[in-house]
Image (spheres, rainbow, N blue to C red):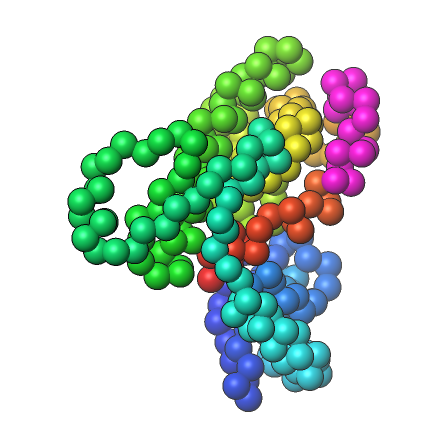
Amino acid sequence: MAGEIIESQSELEWKLRISPRARYARLLIKPFGGLEVVIPKRFPRNQVAGLVAKHATWARRQLARQSKLRQSIRLPQYLSLAFDNSATPVIYQDDPLQLNFELFEEQSTDRIVVRASGHQECIRELRSWIRHRARESFPALLAQISTRTGLGFNKMSVRSQKTRWGSCSRRGNISLNDQLLFLPANTVEYLMIHELCHTRHLNHSKAFWALVESHCPDFRAHEKLLSDSRNLVPDWFLLDLYS
């Protein structure tokens, strides 16, 4: 099982992740998450520090750019979701008197009221709102697609994943990334078809892709959009996800 270990050298800190899928060692600058070193299981641990030292100049330059980006992030005034083409105004209330007085006030559906003080606390409230919206929106759509395709599943969950848009377990449990709300609905529907097809083929074999194509002929276009869509996720969302 992959794991993360914090290491440092010469004031340069990194996360070490041992991945059973990795074929070679590599350095990554995660969005707002710092330096990560990914190594295969059999890569000698005593060579990691040397690998980092070899690329230290590059790493420090990228980390400096990342630091400037973190400082420039602003809280959104509207929360825009491509999934349902919505743009909901966000109202921030950090006055302690307002927080106490309006604690039990029912929020209007045409606005988001964030009752928190501090930049990071506000971001976490917004992320909580996103996850709640995803848990409201995805189950009915997945059930509808399941019925239409004849591809059943066991249960569905919504999580905030750093690298995957979705996954399917051997038991037919489907996990969907709440960040899918920032993507167009037809691509989200394709992702659901993709994961439902994994209930029949838990791999990416020719048989799997043939099943995918039978339910979504233009799957290649959606695959390309999914691979290029991380830039559709707002920076403030990634800041909290990788912090």
- Relative to 13, residue 81 above or below: above
Closer-to-camera residue (114/185): 114
Q: Residue at x 49, y 23 (%)?
A: 139
- Observer able to see residue 181: no
Based on the picture, tell me whether residue 72 belongs to the magenta stretch.
no
Percent coordinates x, y for residue 196 in the rendering = 62, 24
Based on the picture, tell me whether residue 224 belongs to the magenta stretch.
yes
Q: Quadrant of residue 204?
A: top right
Q: Residue at x 66, y 79 (%)?
A: 61
Q: Residue furthest bottom?
A: 10
- Observer able to see residue 116: yes
Closer-to-camera residue (83/134): 83
- Relative to 136, residue 62 above or below: below
Q: Which contiguous range is marked in magenta?
A: 211-225
Q: Residue at x 43, y 44 (%)?
A: 90
Percent coordinates x, y for residue 217 in the rendering = 81, 22
Tell me which secondary structure the magenta stretch mostly adopts.
Answer: helix
Looking at the rendered structure, the number of numbered marks drawn on it comes to 0
Q: Residue at x 18, y 45 (%)?
A: 101
Percent coordinates x, y for residue 7 in the rendering = 51, 76
Closer-to-camera residue (16/183): 183
Percent coordinates x, y for residue 14 in the rendering = 55, 73
Q: Quadrant of residue 197?
A: top right
